[in-house]
């Protein structure tokens, strides 16, 4: 029997990064590896039910979770506040970054004690200090950026060409060297390409320097989704690049799907029976990710658009400063009464992958975070795209212009965390409603979009099955680890 491979993993403290990494741990273990996941207690508690199920159940996967203390107090954060979505105020982001930098020492102390020594250390790309740790312990480091090949290539071509640098914020420009004609404005770019302060530029520089010396990279995508982009990425980065997704597809049954990333704020059975009562393909699922925040007037526009579109909907309203106010609006304005039976509002955390896989859902209104985009693709759903910040505008282009499965609500500028009040309403209810109706309509265009989305779902499924491209890439990755 082949010798067992041991892989250590260290995720970042944002749901969009640790959720796919936990899925990746499960997949690695399903492919025969032993995995040690190293993280802080709050994050570990969020994925404990998912890990317990696969380690203690019949499958008996070999995944061990080791904790390092999170320095809340030293970094000026409230006790237990270890993730981006748990920050009470957006300006605490800088404290979180301070805390993350402080993890290096305890991480190294723990890493030294791990036996047998791991063959690979898979680390989130934004934890740039892991580069030094990997050097110190002479273990090859594989980075995980949590994004698509399309985004990686756009970002690479923009940062090497600098075509956008001297332009005004709203001047459109073409991304050079892409297989498709893709246009952006500087106001839509992520901070990594358009840093807004000296600190953020320094942070991004550290991340790219560390990324450049990594042994390889794992990507949550599949080759058939973006073949020309993965080909180009391999040309730029070399062969140690493995597309092993969609990672969310490792969650096969409803319990796995429901216990992903956090405890759901709604009972999963209640959610499923509500969906069971709706017509097939009739429901719009609206969720703008785990960390984005909308201003109160913008939330009201979204609610009003969902109401006006006349389709049944599930609307996820994140917890946070203004949840009470939007709740009050729903009651006092009569929204709740008027949409009774037709609208299900989830206040907090939704079992997203469970909902997306229900046959009653017909469209996904998404902020185009990469996980959500890929989860929508894996569920075979057409999308209403509403990017807010980070690389979301890039993902929107992939969904709308390359894959042709999305309709944009027409957001023009990135609204970074903390700037929501300054921008107020950036997308009006008529625009949201228009995009929802276009995606849901039964005409030829809508039907073609739905067919394309269904085709991608089949491709995604095949990629993860035995002998599929992502399955084989996972085997190659483990084989590479075995040779270390
Ligand atoms: N998610 C979820 N329930 C929620 C909100 C988000 O399960 O109520 C999950 C979602 O399925 C995805 C992740 O959180 O896996 C969000 O990652 P994404 O890259 O889409 O966006 P981000 O939150 O990083 O902006």
Image (tube, rainbow, N blue to C red):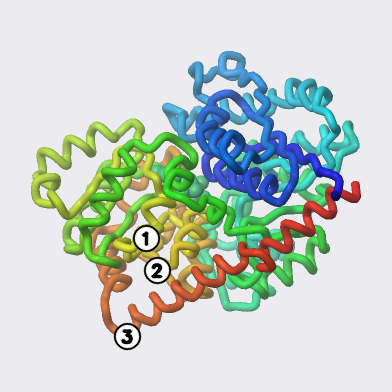
Element type at mark 2? loop
Disc nearer the start of the sequence (2/1): 1
Residue holding disc 3 = 444
Element type at mark 3? helix
The answer to whether the residue labelled 2 contacts the one labelled 1, judged by CB atoms less than 8 Å apart, is: yes
The answer to whether the residue labelled 1 contacts the one labelled 3, judged by CB atoms less than 8 Å apart, is: no
Numbered mark located on residue 320 in the image: none
Q: Residue furthest top?
A: 73
Q: Is mark 3 within 8 Å of ligand 1?
A: no
Tell me if residue 44 can be seen.
yes
Disc nearer the start of the sequence (1/3): 1
The residue located at (49%, 75%) in the rendering is 455
Residue holding disc 1 = 364
Q: Position of residue 113 (x, y in %)?
A: 82, 23
Residue holding disc 2 = 382
The residue located at (52%, 53%) in the rendering is 371
Q: Is mark 2 within 8 Å of ligand 1?
A: no
| Res 331 → quadrant | top left
What distance separates the C-alpha of mark 2 from that of mark 1? Answer: 7 Å
């Amino acid at each position: 029997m082949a010798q067992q491979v041991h892989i250590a993993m260290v995720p970042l403290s944002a749901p969009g990064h640790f959720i796919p990494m936990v899925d990746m741990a499960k997949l690695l273990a399903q492919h025969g590896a032993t995995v040690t996941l190293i993280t802080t207690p709050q994050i570990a508690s969020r994925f404990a039910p998912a890990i317990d199920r696969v380690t203690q159940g019949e499958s008996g996967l070999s995944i061990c979770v080791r904790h390092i203390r999170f320095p809340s107090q030293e970094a000026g954060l409230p006790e237990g506040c270890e993730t981006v979505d748990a920050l009470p105020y957006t300006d605490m982001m800088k404290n979180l970054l301070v805390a993350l930098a402080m993890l290096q020492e305890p991480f190294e102390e723990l890493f030294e004690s791990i036996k047998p020594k791991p063959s690979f250390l898979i680390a989130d790309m934004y934890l740039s200090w892991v580069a030094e740790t990997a050097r110190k312990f002479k273990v090859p480091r594989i980075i995980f950026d949590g994004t698509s090949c399309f985004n990686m290539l756009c970002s690479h071509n923009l940062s090497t060409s600098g075509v956008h640098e001297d332009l005004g914020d709203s001047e459109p420009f073409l991304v050079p060297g892409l297989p498709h004609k893709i246009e952006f404005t500087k106001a839509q770019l992520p901070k990594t390409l358009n840093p807004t302060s000296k600190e953020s530029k320094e942070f991004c520089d550290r991340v790219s320097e560390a990324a450049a010396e990594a042994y390889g990279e794992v990507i949550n995508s599949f080759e058939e989704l973006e073949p020309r982009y993965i080909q180009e990425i391999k040309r730029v980065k070399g062969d140690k690049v493995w597309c092993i997704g969609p990672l969310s597809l490792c969650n096969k049954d409803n319990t796995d799907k429901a216990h992903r990333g956090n405890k759901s704020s709604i009972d999963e059975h209640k959610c499923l029976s509500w969906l069971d009562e709706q017509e097939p393909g009739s429901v719009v699922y609206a969720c703008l990710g785990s960390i984005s925040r909308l201003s109160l007037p913008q939330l009201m526009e979204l609610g009003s658009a969902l109401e006006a579109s006349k389709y049944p909907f599930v609307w996820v309203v994140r917890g946070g400063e203004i949840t009470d106010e939007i709740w009050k609006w729903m009651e006092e304005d009569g929204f709740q009464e008027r949409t009774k039976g037709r609208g299900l509002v989830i206040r907090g955390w939704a079992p997203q992958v469970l909902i997306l896989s229900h046959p009653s859902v017909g469209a996904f209104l998404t902020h185009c975070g990469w996980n959500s985009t890929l989860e929508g693709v894996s569920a075979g759903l057409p999308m209403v795209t509403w990017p807010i910040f980070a690389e979301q505008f890039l993902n929107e282009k992939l969904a709308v212009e390359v894959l042709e499965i999305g309709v944009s609500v027409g957001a023009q500028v990135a609204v970074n965390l903390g700037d929501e009040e300054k921008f107020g309403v950036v997308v009006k209810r008529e625009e949201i409603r228009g995009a929802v109706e276009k995606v849901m309509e039964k005409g030829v265009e809508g039907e073609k979009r739905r067919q394309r989305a269904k085709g991608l779902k089949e491709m995604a499924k095949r990629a993860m099955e035995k002998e599929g491209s992502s399955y084989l890439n996972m085997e190659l990755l483990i084989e590479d680890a075995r040779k270390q």
